[in-house]
Image (spheres, helix red, strand yellow):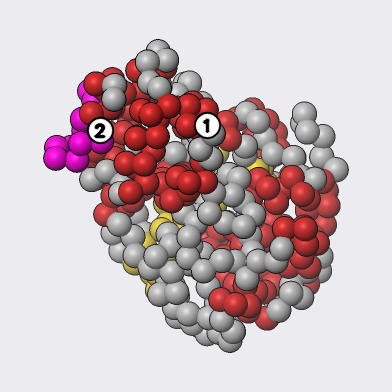
Amino acid sequence: MHPALVPVVDRRAAAGPEQWDALWQALADGALDRGDALALLASLTAALPEEGSLLAMVDALDRRRPARPAGSWAGTVNVVGTGGGPPTVNLSTAAALVAAACGVRIVKSGSRAHTARTGSIDLLDRLGVPFATSLDQTSRHLETHGIAFTGPFVYPVQLARLALLAVPTPMRVFGRFLNILGPFLAAVPVSAQVTGVSGGRVPSALRALASRPGTPVTWLVTNPLGADELLSMCDNTIHLPDGGTLTLRAGELVPAGGSPDDLAPVPRDAAAEHFRSVLTGRAGAPLRATLQLNAAALALASGHRDDWAKAVAEAGAALDDGAALDLLERLKGADRAG
């Protein structure tokens, strides 16, 4: 094992900035081998580092990123979850399109499937929707369509290097770590972020990541069914940046019938066509209500709306009048270079 790796995988003491800097430098220098990469990924997947070490890790990754543009894209919200919980259709991707059809400026970051049946990028590929490959392209898509889907470029290159070192072990083996931490590693200059956290609770380490200086105003969403999205059939809690919480009671804003089974994914070869039916609002009442709730959250978090009932109603209208599906079709025809 490379010496730089020892203090990171040895949990008897928290790894600080110097240890993480030494590790990422060793990776950049080509001094780590496959065994080192597997040891690091296995350690991170088994259990997240304690709060101080986790913050030091992310800070060390940030110091190695290219310079970011000054300021943020005002009124723009990123939506990305931690994965896990009951399996569902791509709710955050669908909610992003519904909210964008209502005039909310949306960035949707995501990845290929690590634990889910179909990740957001897998689905976009099947739908023929291009995703941005740079921040400049993300900005152009946002200005042209009101929504942009980002590719892997928003994540630290160190993760890709670890993946290459780990071959032939697939990264889905380490999906739990990648899913949980991914939402807090996406470098997009939005002003707000909505992140669903699976498991029904928010670990203190994730709260710390969400409140790091320079991060967008982040809402962390939980519910007792353990999903990483707002669900219409149960109460939901939004954990706000100031430490407070907002509880959305089942049945208050949208009908509360159904169960997570009504949100279940379909086989991959049917995913694209089913997703189009989801955007019509006619794929079942619980799914429709859940989409309205999640789209409304994006409208409120971004500052586009300040009234939940009105935002829910607008989301329903975007499903009924075809605006959400029309937006998807326009994106399919978008120039991948534009």
Give SS at disc 1.
loop
Upstream in the sequence, badge 2 or badge 1? Answer: 2
Residue at 48% across / 21% down in the picture?
66
Left/right of residue 222 with respect to residue 72 in the rendered view: left
Residue located at (34% from left, 35% from top):
39
Horizontal side of 5 relative to 271 (left or right) equals left
State which quarter of the image contains the C terminus. Answer: top right
User: Which residue appears at 31% of the width and 33% of the height?
Assistant: 57
Instruction: Give the label on residue 156, or none.
Output: none
| Distance of label 2 from label 1 (alpha carbons) | 21 Å
The amino acid marked with disc number 2 is Val
Residue nearer the viewer, 195 or 253:
195
Which is closer to the viewer, label 2 or label 1? Answer: 1
Helix, strand or loop status at disc 2: helix
Residue 71 visible in the picture: no
> What is the number of the mark on residue 8?
2
Q: Which residues lie in the magenta part?
A: 7-19
Q: Position of residue 69 (x, y in %)?
A: 51, 26
Q: Nearer the viewer, residue 241 or 38?
A: 38
Q: Amino acid at mark 1?
A: Val
**Percent coordinates x, y for residue 27 in the rendering:** 39, 20
Find disc 1 in the rendering and name its residue: 167
Determine crowd level at label 2: few under 14, some 14-19, many 20+ residues with C-alpha closer than 10 A.
many
Q: Residue 62, how many percent across, how many down?
A: 39, 28
Res. 40 image quadrant: top left
Taking the spot 71% from the left edge, 63% from the top edge, the residue there is 267
Q: Residue furthest top?
A: 29
Residue 219 spot, x, y in % from top left: 42, 57
